Amino acid sequence: MDRIISPRNLVSFAKGAQRLRRRSTIGGWMAGLAITVLVVIWVTPTVGLFVSSFRTDFDIQSSGWWTTLIDPFDRTQWTIDNYRRVLEAEALGRAFVNTMAVTLPSVVLTLLIAAYAGYAFSWIDFRYRDIYFGIFVAMLVVPLQVAFIPLLRSWTGLGMSRSLLSIWLTHTGFGMPIATLIIRNYIAGLPAELIEAARMERASHFQVFRKVVLPLSMPAIAAFSVFQFLWVWNDFLVALVFLGGNPDRQVLTMALQKLISSRGTDWHLLSAGAFVTMVVPLLVFITLQKHFVRGLTAGAVKG
């Protein structure tokens, strides 16, 4: 006999569902509040740095940056001379161009070679493949500092010392193990039916990689490109070793360190220089945020 639900049981079920909805609502509000607090704590220093970069030295020394929010439309408290001075007089403009010239080729070379290597380690059968891959990934445990002297001697012997090509290849070599590991793991998880269908159509490995694997691997490639870009852009040690102290070749981190050494108390210039250094990484992360999240979560759920 079917169980008969009495009106009293219906009322109890309704009250239970109402309590669950209330708890869910309270939990959602608390989670939203916690996220908001974390975002405010994280963003406040950046906002303060940005505001300070447009203030004069006298205003910074006499009042806090938050005082400008009382009357933000008062033009007398804003100036762009800080950026003009750091970009021209302090040579951060040239350093910005040098950093772009170092970063973009280094990122492109790393991703291109790592993508080819990831495909080879995933879908091309050759002798000792797994052993080679293990040795390749084992390079992650080798500190990059131990390779500075051998690499510098090698570039000097080849006549490439203090050149952009030497630092491109150096950044590419240092980034290859982790890039290959991440991209290879993603490519290995692609449906085998797609690769087999392309091979049955007599497509070469290069055609399979270019037309099938590469488009499907863009989330992982975009995710790692953010990591590689930030690492190369914010690098100081590798640039100092392989580019030297030539003012014409210095990157932003070297120029900012020089600015701190020479103008350690000029907070209006230091804040402007710091924001020049960080504005491009911020734009890159914001632009590629969607691809970055997709690349991190790709392959987390199968089926």
Image (cartoon, grey):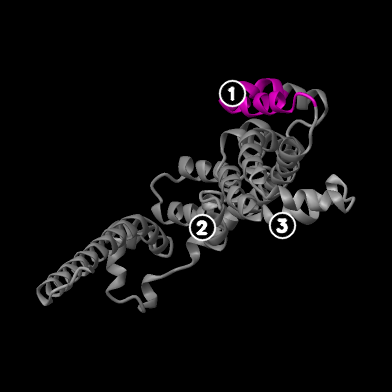
SS state under label 1: loop
* Label 2 with label 3: CB-CB less than 8 Å: no
Q: Amino acid at mark 3?
A: Pro
Judge whether 222 appears above or below 172 on screen: below
Q: Nearer the viewer, mark 2 or mark 1?
A: 1
**Mark 1 or mark 3, which is nearer the start of the sequence?**
1
Instruction: Judge left or right: residue 46 versus residue 96.
Output: left
Question: Residue 270 versus residue 224: which sits nearer the camera?
Answer: 224
Task: Name the residue beneath numbered marker 3.
Answer: 215
Instruction: Judge left or right: residue 230 versus residue 29.
Output: right
Q: Amino acid at mark 1?
A: Val
- The CA span between labels 2 and 1 is 30 Å
Task: Name the residue beneath numbered marker 1.
Answer: 142
SS state under label 3: helix
Give the magenta range. 127-152
| Residue drawn at the location 74% of the way across and 46% of the way down | 112
| Residue drawn at the location 87% of the way across and 51% of the way down | 203
